[in-house]
Image (tube, coloured by chain):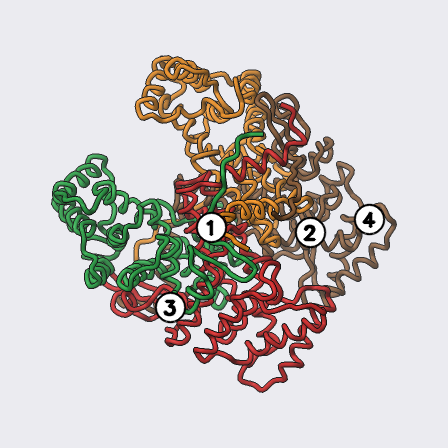
Chain colours: A orange, B brown, C red, D green
Amino acid sequence: MSQRKPIRTDIAWSTPSTITVKGFDLCKDVLGTLSLGDMAFLELTDRLPTTRESVVFNAIAVTLVEHGLTPSAIATRMTYTGAPEAMQAAVAAGLCGLGSVFVGSMETAARMLQEALPDPAKKADLGELARGIVEHFHARKQAVPGIGHPLHKPEDPRAPRLFQIAAENGFDGPYIKLMRQVAKEAQSVYGKPLPINATGAIAAIASELMLPWRIVRGIGVMARAIGLVGHVLEEMRAPMAREIKARAEEEATAHLRKV
Amino acid sequence: MSQRKPIRTDIAWSTPSTITVKGFDLCKDVLGTLSLGDMAFLELTDRLPTTRESVVFNAIAVTLVEHGLTPSAIATRMTYTGAPEAMQAAVAAGLCGLGSVFVGSMETAARMLQEALPDPAKKADLGELARGIVEHFHARKQAVPGIGHPLHKPEDPRAPRLFQIAAENGFDGPYIKLMRQVAKEAQSVYGKPLPINATGAIAAIASELMLPWRIVRGIGVMARAIGLVGHVLEEMRAPMAREIKARAEEEATAHLRKV
Amino acid sequence: MSQRKPIRTDIAWSTPSTITVKGFDLCKDVLGTLSLGDMAFLELTDRLPTTRESVVFNAIAVTLVEHGLTPSAIATRMTYTGAPEAMQAAVAAGLCGLGSVFVGSMETAARMLQEALPDPAKKADLGELARGIVEHFHARKQAVPGIGHPLHKPEDPRAPRLFQIAAENGFDGPYIKLMRQVAKEAQSVYGKPLPINATGAIAAIASELMLPWRIVRGIGVMARAIGLVGHVLEEMRAPMAREIKARAEEEATAHLRKV
Amino acid sequence: MSQRKPIRTDIAWSTPSTITVKGFDLCKDVLGTLSLGDMAFLELTDRLPTTRESVVFNAIAVTLVEHGLTPSAIATRMTYTGAPEAMQAAVAAGLCGLGSVFVGSMETAARMLQEALPDPAKKADLGELARGIVEHFHARKQAVPGIGHPLHKPEDPRAPRLFQIAAENGFDGPYIKLMRQVAKEAQSVYGKPLPINATGAIAAIASELMLPWRIVRGIGVMARAIGLVGHVLEEMRAPMAREIKARAEEEATAHLRKV
């Protein structure tokens, strides 16, 4: 028999009369007290948020719930059309697309900030760090994560609002400052306005909240699952998936069909 | 060309300078004001919750976030092991199992209550409705949804706590009463204690909140996505998937291998 | 500690120098000998197909590979757009929609046939069975599975071709006869032509191959995974997902946006 | 209105009386003639395989169908337990884990070979290319893709068998030679036996078949979907998911529970 390694979780356990989650008694300490957003914070940090952390964390999570008729929402609706008895699989299908292109970009931006500034308590020349970051991406002909937006011009209105909420709650530290420096530096190197987008603001604020970059995408996954349930509900009541499919199929095969 | 039907969503839309979700200006009205749980309520009902509705809805959602090392959590961890670059797909894999057996049972219970009592404002003989429900399932040799629990005996501690929170916030209406009658009636027909479980309590409270049964499973899907991100995070830090797999494989193929 | 039940698989196992699948030595007996379709037959039946079974099984599986720009294919393409680094999740998203409405209908049809005729070796009055089946669905105002098609009129060309292949290979038994009787009976009850569709033909032939109805949907899942990889490849080379999304979003929110 | 781009597919289309796939009439040219593996080849290459290509392609696809109780198979079984009515979602959950760690490694190996040798018809110094490749990975302290195996020692029996099948069918070209050189070179640099594994053999043979590296992972996705349906079937008949879960949960929370 091969050597066994221990299996251990510290997330949750139950006895016949109690349920414990992250050390809290679900019925006594959590239900009726903790909101869904604070429960999400607990899952990510193993502790309850302060009131100010709660406001800030809920704001970034809420930002990510709903982006309208995204590719993910369409994938969810297409799946629901074929398997209405398995709504959970429709939401799952939508989540599968939260990869490098959309929600995953938050992870890239958070990684950029946290790798440049591993210890936020340590004094650092943010301007120099920002120059290094922008040079790095510019040399590779890659877009700098967290800045610029195809629709929201000249600025993404979510970024200043999120930074305002963060500042009002005492979060205006080095990661937010570094993100601002990166945008400023990028604008000078690329010669065009590249303001911080929602992704960049969330990455910076999540870093201020000490969330490791590897889990930052998870905030988007949690939040978007909520929004995708909303799309399932609308698809139940006012379906569009079959019509989108019918039109796409008709046009896409028009050069081939001779009825 | 075939007849086109209109495609229409009322969930969210954007202009270069604004984002609107369910009629609310995201930056002005939502961020910094609405919590993640209230945003979920907005997705499900197209309106903001009252303070009391917020407490009750957040309580049922929070109940569903984390059930420890469930089959879903293991599916998420197994998937993360093979595709750590696609955390969203790991959460999606876990959600795929929220079907008829576990989270879907809330839907069955909510359907049972709402079909028995389509108009909660209308006077009804709840005892008679409960008798009809229990007879229906008993005759088909099916379990009555929302009652009994394999571990939580003699009662599921979440049910009384959730009902208490609901009552304190003004929700103690006919669906909760009907659920209680069903449990009482079932106990007499099946001849053993069958107290309301978390599923039954949530189904009844969701019905009081006027959530249609077809979307009740969605509360579980939203909530569990949050919990599954927590399992991804723990799997990153203290992995167990490979060990679970190694042991299962070793035992399951022991009768076949002769090394 | 709770009572342990054994964990056991008979599918596959390995030693340092051998890999065994369903009792066959992969390197010696399978590779270079077995085709992918025959391997699928082995997975479903625990034995190799005869030459005639192979032709028939491959024909029904091949029928299910590609149905063009289906909702599933669109879900796959939408997912690939967001997560091009996780092609497997794009195929998974497409598979999630193979539920009751599309591919799952094969399962319903196979169940209908196998429950009516549990033992195909036993003499039965197929006309009477067919009358019972059609009455059952007609009384419930449900469509009879396996007959009629929205596009393929007056007949679905796949059905006669599949039955021809089956007959040429010795498969023209009671399930195929019963399916034909069901179509004939339905036509008389519903008063319109309702020829057997691909789904009905596949369900009948799968039943002739002794595949239990509970796994019949699996043939569609296997086959469509192949087709969805083809859609990923085309989406890489000639993308359409973003354009479909842009158009749908533009129309669907036109009543809301005032730029 | 924004500028519209055309939407176009060349995969499949239908008229009331015909179904066309990749230019072939499904009923006349494909059914009864093409096997499932050859259909997969058609999806990947837009043409039918020669007899020899068919043997070789089917061999590599068959190799990937079944690897026993993998993390993917466990994810599929866990999902089936919770949602037995949605078998397609169980297979989807299993596919989600075919990422960078397991099946995705074929993609990495194929990319390595194809980027080193973009034009296989052009004369190249394979020894030099191999040295460059091994140096590249060695300098980054990364494993060289396609060589070494934790269980199959001293060699992975699938690799020589697949190369034998390829050679017997006329495929013994520069990609296979380069893969061999890479293994030889790695052995000398790392100072230990690092024979070609199944992944490396498949990557080399897929490259000989002119399949672009970006789609090579797709062969694994297609094939494993077949195997995962086999695991669903076994889980139906001889379930193990709940027992695996019960044991894992018991051990993993033992340090927390005091019943």
Q: In whole angstroms, how far apart are the C-alphas of marks 2 and 1?
A: 32 Å
Closest to the observer, D61 or C61: C61
Badge 3 is on which residue? C38
Element class at badge 4: loop
Indicate which disc residue B200 carries.
2
Amino acid type shown at disc 3 = Asp
Task: Please name which of the two marks, 3 or 1, marks the residue nearer to the observer.
Answer: 3
Badge 1 is on which residue? C92
Element class at badge 1: helix
- Mark 3 or 1 closer to N-term? 3
**Residue A143 drawn at (x, y percent):** 39, 25
Q: In whole angstroms, how far apart are the C-alphas of marks 4 and 2?
A: 19 Å
- Could you tell me if the residues under marks 1 and 4 are in contact, i.e. CB atoms within 8 Å? no
Task: Please name which of the two marks, 3 or 4, marks the residue nearer to the observer.
Answer: 3
Element class at badge 3: helix
Q: Quadrant of the C terminus of chain B?
A: bottom left
Query: How many residues crowd around disc 4 within 10 Å: few (fewer than 14), some, or many (20 or more)?
Result: few
Observer able to see residue D242: yes
Query: Label 2 lies in what chain?
Result: B
Observer able to see residue A34: no
* Image vertical order of residue D14 relative to residue C256, above or below: below
Query: How many residues crowd around disc 2 within 10 Å: few (fewer than 14), some, or many (20 or more)?
Result: many
Indicate which disc residue B119 carries.
4
Query: Label 3 lies in what chain?
Result: C
**Residue D237 drawn at (x, y percent):** 49, 68
